[in-house]
Amino acid sequence: MTSPATAEQPKAIQIGLPALSNSYAQLPERFFAQTDPKPVSEPRLIRFNRPLAKELGLDADQLTSPDGVEMLAGNRFPAGLQAIALAYAGHQFGNFVPQLGDGRALLLGEVVDVNGIRRDIQLKGSGPTRFSRNGDGRAALGPVLREYVVGEAMAALGIPTTRGLAAVLTGDPVYREVRLPGAVLTRVATSHIRIGTFQYFAARRDTAGLKILADYAIQRHFPLLARQARRYRALLEAVVAAQADLVARWMLVGFIHGVMNTDNMAISGETIDYGPCAFMDAYDPSAVFSSIDRVGRYAYANQPHVATWNLARFAETLLPLMSTDENEAVSEAEEVLVSFQSSYETVLQRGFRRKLGLRTEAEGDLQLAADFLDVLAVGEADFTLGFRRLGDDLDAADGQGTARQLFQDPGAFDVWSARWRERIASEAADTATRRAGMHAANPKFIPRNHRIEAMIKAALGGDFEPFEEILRVISRPFDEQPGMERYADPPRPDERVLQTFCGT
């Protein structure tokens, strides 16, 4: 269906969906800007996430109808729907920008899903807003497909994440370094409130706005805190715990976010804003893929430290709400921030024990895990397959397993493997049970960078089958999937992707 790109605003349609509410739009006007998407010329549905639609209680058939696709492209909306662009600020690579905001995204509204959780529905790439800062407000096809794939991979891995409900081609080009096809992503999140949202009001010394936002965030994400006498301290505690859990989960699968600015950190504890993200191939704690991270600020090993820094910026915004005595507020905030490390280490240590097949706790376990990472680094071995093949090799005689083949010089692995086998032999567990537990903790399939880049290249040429295939594979990351082994393989030297790009 073709719509005139010169239309001033979306036309009203009736598509028989449950009415979208928008509790955020009930906040004061300074929290957002009401904005109409800029219509596109020829929207075409690339992908619709039917399982997610069912989870949200949405009618997939209606949303994939011609009128539904018009809505997903931003051309037509149900009567009464008013889209908004959210205001926020943020530290970008350590430099504070007092006004950022949704420069290419619009919040359509919210639904309460089948589990009773309120979730945002947002269009990304829908055109310029008040916060676009001279940008075109559009998204290119490649970044839309990357975000869709990586979000679905994270969901399948059990990591909190925003997700793509739909991807639509616009029929219009966008111009970056070159001319590219434009696309719109429909994104779902438990909310789009960021650390930077709080910074927006703090920068303006708008304590009243901060209180409104904090109370809204508590009610939306942590309602049990509403009755606590120290609810703003409790809010900080909850966000610190959520971020500690999230970042530890990233580390356990070798995920590198790539741009952990405060405006890209959701207080919900969901992964948000997949730009120059990547999963590691060969293990390297200093790995950086983002083309704009020239000093390694957001390298793999730095992620927990950056998260702590970001949370300190969040704590600063809450100080006026925590106490009228600034020294008391600072002391409270510092007490809470210290808890990040212990929460993070608890999740990380539990996760590494599972990855190594350890069913009990014993002294030396953490050193065993740390030493395996060192062995992976020295041997330039693949992070994902290094752990996965330990489970495969439980029946193998020492030195005969497939994990050993990953190492350029397996000598250090052989020494470590003898220690590991001695440790697991100290536990009473049959091999099949241990292997099942290890395979449930160690994915075989991740969205490898070279596969994503190949998928995007094919899509730019009009072939979306590689996109569909990679989605099928990463939706079952822990299964063997015979015939799909190439998706588990690390890249050949000529296939390595050393840089990823934000795509804004």
Image: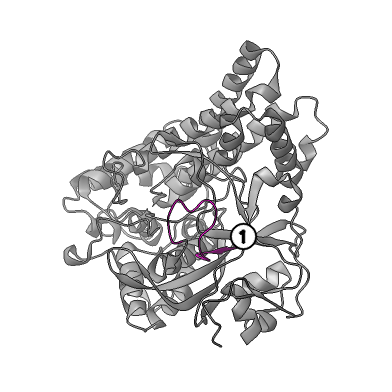
Percent of width and height locating residue 83: 66, 61
Q: Which residue carries the number 1 mark?
A: 35
Determine the residue positioned at 32% across, 82% down: 461
Dot 1 surroundings within 10 Å: few (below 14), some, or many (20 or more)? Answer: some
Q: Is residue 52 left or right of residue 488?
A: right
Q: Is residue 49 left or right of residue 493?
A: right
Answer above or below: position of 209 versus 148.
Answer: above
Residue 362 seen anywhere in this rendered image of the structure: no
Q: Is residue 228 visible?
A: yes
Looking at the image, residue 183 lies above or below residue 194:
below
Judging depth in this view, the residue of 245 and 278 nearest the camera is 278
Residue 8 in picture, x, y percent from top left: 59, 71
Asked which quadrant contains residue 328, the reply is: top right
**119 over 483 or under it: above or below:** above
Q: Give the residue at x 32% y 43%.
A: 373
Please check the rendered image and state whether residue 396 is part of the magenta-colored stretch, yes or no.
no
Q: Is residue 158 left or right of residue 261?
A: right
Magenta stretch: helix, strand or loop mostly: loop
Q: Amino acid at mark 1?
A: Thr
Element type where label 1 sits in the image? loop
Quarter of the image containing the C terminus?
bottom left
Indicate the position of residue 6 as horizontal and vertical percent values. 53, 76
User: Residue 134 in magenta?
Assistant: yes
Q: Nearer the viewer, residue 445 or 482?
A: 445
Q: Which residue is situated farthest in the right direction here?
A: 227
Q: Position of residue 206 (x, y in %)?
A: 65, 30
Magenta span of residues:
121-136
Q: Please identify the quarter of the rendering in which residue 139 is found.
A: bottom left
Is 71 positioned to the left or the right of 408 in the image?
Answer: right
Residue at x 34% of width, y 38% of height: 297
Residue at x-position 73% and y-position 63%: 113
382 and 439: which is toward the camera = 382
